[in-house]
């Protein structure tokens, strides 16, 4: 599965991510949605400083940490699923 998925991966549109805006112009309150950030400590795509800046720029209700690279869905899928299930629980971040 990991080999097939890695063959299907495409380059990330960096410019689109850098210019992303969270206001659709219709007054929708995007902060009304609870969110978590999954920090990957061995990431070689986003440095720890870049991840911290992202967290400070748009603070989540919780920061979860994985001792993985940028692709925990390959390197630690069970641990990632565990964190996502925890984040998705009805009483988490409320």
Image: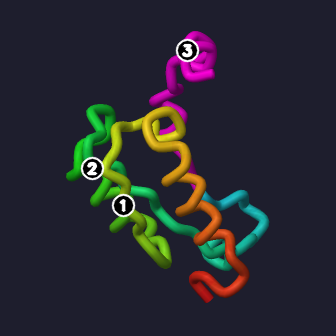
Give the labeled residue for mark 3.
3
Nearest to N terminus: mark 1 or mark 3 = 3
Instruction: Tell me residue 38's x, y (percent).
Output: 44, 57
The local crowd at label 1, few if under 14, some if 14 to 19, many if 20 or more residues have their Cα within 10 Å, is few
Q: Disc 2 or disc 3, which is closer to the eye?
A: 3
Nearest to N terminus: mark 2 or mark 1 = 2
Q: Secondary structure at mark 1?
A: strand
Q: Tell which of 69 and 45 is nearer to you.
A: 69
Horizontally, residue 81 falls left or right of residue 17, namely right
Horizontally, residue 58 falls left or right of residue 43, namely right
Q: Is residue 90 above or below residue 86?
A: below
Magenta-tinted stretch: 1-21
Q: Residue furthest right?
A: 26
Circle 2/circle 1 CB separation < 8 Å: yes
Horizontally, residue 71 falls left or right of residue 3, namely left
Disc number for residue 65: 1
Could you give the CA–CA distance between mark 1 and mark 3, rounded to whole angstroms?
Answer: 25 Å
Q: Residue furthest top?
A: 7
Query: Which residue occupies 49% across, 78% down?
Result: 61
Q: Secondary structure at mark 3?
A: helix
Q: Is residue 9 above or below residue 32?
A: above
């Amino acid at each position: 599965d990991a080999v097939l998925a890695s063959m299907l991966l495409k380059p990330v549109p960096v410019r689109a991510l850098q210019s992303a805006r969270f206001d659709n112009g219709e007054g929708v309150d995007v902060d009304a949605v609870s969110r978590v950030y999954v920090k990957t400590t061995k990431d070689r795509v986003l440095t720890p400083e870049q991840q911290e800046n992202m967290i400070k720029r748009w603070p989540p209700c919780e920061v979860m940490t994985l001792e993985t690279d940028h692709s925990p869905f390959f390197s630690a899928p069970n641990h990632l699923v565990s964190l996502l299930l925890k984040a998705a629980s009805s009483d988490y971040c409320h």
